Image (spheres, rainbow, N blue to C red):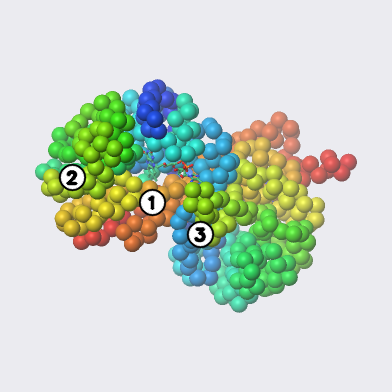
């Protein structure tokens, strides 16, 4: 049993946001190896998302430019939320308000009985423009988080972009505002070009990079955040096998997200969970004991 | 629940950039895809991260066959590796053909794959059908036909080295001139779009197109395979790969 945000979970693994975009599609997977799932980010208005192509293979990585295609808050409240009661695992609802005024429109959701909300701040900052993400503006992130915190009594997770000038500073600011956990991190903005046509493959030019190639970059960020704040960390980015998951925990993640690896192997969670159990057994350690363990070794 | 099955190659043939291979089932694990369905194929090569969607060329209790055009690293890896993981079968499948219809199968390039499976089903169900295959290089097609095809097939090659000389449009006009009232087609998008205007003109009652798109998951999870076909947006892995156009021009899902 793993205790996380006041809940007993059967496993420290979770499915990251947007990897399985619709609730009904989770039934195609064995959910046994997971402790919980995070749903696709919901925005205030329904979004069609970006034009094709939306995905591209990289080297040990993939690119996506889905564009937060989702049903929007109203449909989510009416059709998805009622189904959560029958869902076999605890569920985190991910949201992306684009502005302070949009936060207010999420009130009907905040008043529901939800275990946890993940605030996805790796979305475009429409209020301050300039192609920046909300989490890249610490003061603005603070304001959004504080407004959500004031209105939502459940557990509040904030998911940050890995592309930050000063991630520890953001983490500390968010913890000051009362967030319960940090998800480190989202995809890395990257670029892939069509060399024949001499232009970017994706219509929005940059696309999110995920998959095994980003693991070391994510581990570094988890390490830094673990050093700067005391809230639990959700690790997300690049896990493909059990060693990756253990590395995340040793770096400081309390729970480990499985993402694009599910596209390569829908059963990947089972293998990772088996590997974790074998490792813990062999080392006579509990999951809790290995969270951040590598920091202790370094500071000795 | 999604299947992920390991299969082992037992036979492979390659003609320049086109390869065919047969894989054997391992143990008693066997799959039952329908013509038109596809698998997401993964190899052990770690530099190819995402699986690649590939239609079933043929499948029975002895094994499963694929016909693959080598385009980039994903298809090249499939041809190089002896073991493949198959996720699936995925997607919808061709409907029919009912008996008593005049059935045409129109393929372009590697689009022969799903239609070959359908043709073999028609053979065993004793349905009548015609197959027309449009290719760029006739010499390559001649080898494929002589080694893999056991039904009547009419080839149009752009270089005129095998069959009739002509392109996808010529192949389309030819099959429609035979008066088919059920058409199944899998070809490059541009060819299928021209075929669409022809079937509209000739009022062909039932046409089934097999579409392509870049995919990440292949099972409706990622929302990555959005495509626009005949003015409609659809997710190829979930709403397709087969889209059916009936008399009133409606895209059925
Ligand atoms: C449902 C379905 C069924 C299919 N069935 C079959 C089948 O049975 N047989 C078959 O052969 N195919 C089939 N396909 C198509 C097949 O999936 C693709 O050909 C395959 O995914 C290509 O992958 P790849 O890695 O080989 O090529 P990729 O590396 O993805 O490249 C694809 C093309 O883009 C070009 N390209 C790649 N990178 C760049 C770049 N940076 N700049 C410019 N150009 C670039 C390549 O040269 C190549 O022409 C099917 C597709 C779908 C959706
Ligand atoms: C297709 C796709 C869609 C995604 N959608 C979302 C999303 O809606 N909200 C979000 O917070 N993260 C989204 N992500 C990011 C993932 O949740 C995850 O943080 C990222 O992919 C890194 O983890 P990975 O390397 O394990 O995939 C998406 C990722 C992918 C590949
Ligand atoms: S490929 Fe993922 S939804 Fe179609």
Contact flag, marks 1 and 3 (Cβ < 8 Å): no
Picture residue at 23% right of the left edge, 60% below the top:
B249
Residue indicated by mark 3: A203
Label 1 beta carbon within 8 A of ligand 1: yes
Residues flagged by tags 1 and 2 on a common chain: yes
Q: Is residue B163 visible?
A: yes
Q: For the residues carrying marks 1 and 2, which lies nearer the camera in this image? A: 2
Instruction: Indicate the chain on which mark 2 is placed.
Output: B
Picture quarter with the N terminus of chain A = top right
Q: Determine the CA span between mark 3 and mark 2.
A: 38 Å
Q: Which mark is residue B175?
A: 2
Q: Residues within 10 Å of mark 2 (few under 14, many from 20)?
A: many
Q: Position of residue A86 (x, y in %)?
A: 48, 56
Residues flagged by tags 3 and 2 on a common chain: no
Q: Is residue A25 visible?
A: no
Q: Position of residue A106 (x, y in %)?
A: 57, 72
Picture quarter with the C terminus of chain A = top right
Front-most of residues B18 and B206: B18
Q: Determine the CA span between mark 1 and mark 2.
A: 26 Å
Q: Residues within 10 Å of mark 3 (few under 14, many from 20)?
A: some
Q: Determine the CA span between mark 1 and mark 3.
A: 19 Å
Q: Quadrant of residue B24?
A: top left
Vertical placement of A130 versus B102: above or below? Answer: below
Instruction: Indicate the chain on which mark 1 is placed.
Output: B
Q: Secondary structure at mark 3?
A: loop
Residue indicated by mark 1: B236
């Amino acid at each position: 049993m793993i205790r996380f945000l006041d809940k007993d979970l059967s496993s420290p693994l979770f499915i990251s946001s947007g990897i399985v975009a619709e609730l009904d599609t989770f039934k195609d997977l064995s959910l046994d190896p997971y402790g919980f799932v995070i749903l696709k980010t919901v925005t205030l208005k329904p979004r069609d998302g970006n034009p094709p192509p939306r995905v591209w293979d990289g080297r040990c990585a993939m690119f996506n430019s889905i564009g937060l295609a989702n049903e929007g808050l109203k449909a989510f409240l009416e059709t998805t939320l009622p189904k959560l009661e029958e869902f076999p695992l605890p569920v985190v609802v991910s949201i992306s308000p684009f502005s302070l005024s949009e936060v207010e429109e999420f009130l009907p959701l905040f008043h529901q009985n939800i275990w946890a909300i993940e605030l996805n701040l790796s979305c475009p900052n429409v209020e301050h423009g300039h192609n920046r993400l909300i989490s890249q503006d610490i003061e603005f992130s603070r304001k959004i988080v504080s407004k959500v915190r004031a209105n939502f009594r459940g557990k509040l997770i904030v998911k940050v972009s890995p592309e930050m000038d000063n991630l520890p500073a953001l983490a500390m600011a968010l913890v000051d505002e009362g967030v319960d956990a940090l998800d480190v991190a989202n995809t890395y903005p990257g670029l892939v070009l069509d060399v024949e046509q001499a232009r970017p493959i994706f219509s929005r030019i940059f696309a999110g990079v995920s998959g095994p190639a980003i693991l070391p970059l994510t581990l570094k960020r988890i390490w830094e955040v673990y050093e700067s704040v005391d809230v639990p960390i959700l690790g997300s980015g690049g896990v493909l096998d059990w060693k990756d998951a253990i590395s995340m925990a040793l770096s400081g993640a309390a729970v480990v997200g499985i993402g694009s690896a599910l596209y390569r192997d829908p059963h990947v969670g089972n293998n990772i969970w088996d590997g974790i159990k074998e490792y813990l057994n062999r080392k006579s350690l509990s999951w809790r004991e290995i969270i951040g363990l590598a920091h202790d070794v370094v500071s000795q | 629940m999604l299947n992920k099955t390991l299969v082992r190659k037992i036979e492979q043939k390659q003609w320049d950039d086109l390869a065919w291979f047969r894989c054997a089932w391992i143990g008693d694990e066997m799959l039952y895809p329908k013509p038109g369905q596809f698998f997401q194929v993964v190899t052990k090569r770690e530099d190819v991260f995402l699986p690649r969607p590939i239609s079933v060329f043929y499948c029975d209790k002895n094994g499963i066959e694929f016909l693959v055009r080598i385009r980039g690293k994903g298809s090249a890896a499939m041809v190089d590796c002896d073991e493949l993981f198959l996720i699936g079968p995925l997607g919808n499948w061709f409907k029919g053909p009912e008996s008593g219809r005049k059935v045409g199968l129109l393929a372009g390039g590697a689009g022969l794959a799903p239609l070959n499976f359908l043709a073999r089903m028609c053979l065993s169900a004793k349905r009548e059908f015609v197959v027309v295959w449009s290719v760029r290089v006739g010499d390559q097609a001649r080898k494929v036909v002589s080694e893999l095809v056991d039904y009547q097939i009419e080839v149009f090659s752009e270089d005129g080295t095998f069959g009739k000389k002509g392109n996808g449009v010529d192949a389309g006009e030819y099959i429609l001139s035979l008066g088919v009232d059920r058409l199944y087609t899998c070809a490059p998008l541009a060819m299928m779009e021209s075929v669409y205007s022809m079937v509209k003109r000739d009022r062909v009652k039932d046409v089934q197109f097999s579409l392509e798109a870049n995919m990440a998951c292949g099972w409706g999870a990622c929302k990555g395979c959005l495509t626009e076909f005949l003015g409609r947006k659809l997710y190829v892995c979930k709403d397709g790969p087969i889209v059916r156009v009936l008399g009133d021009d409606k895209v059925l899902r």
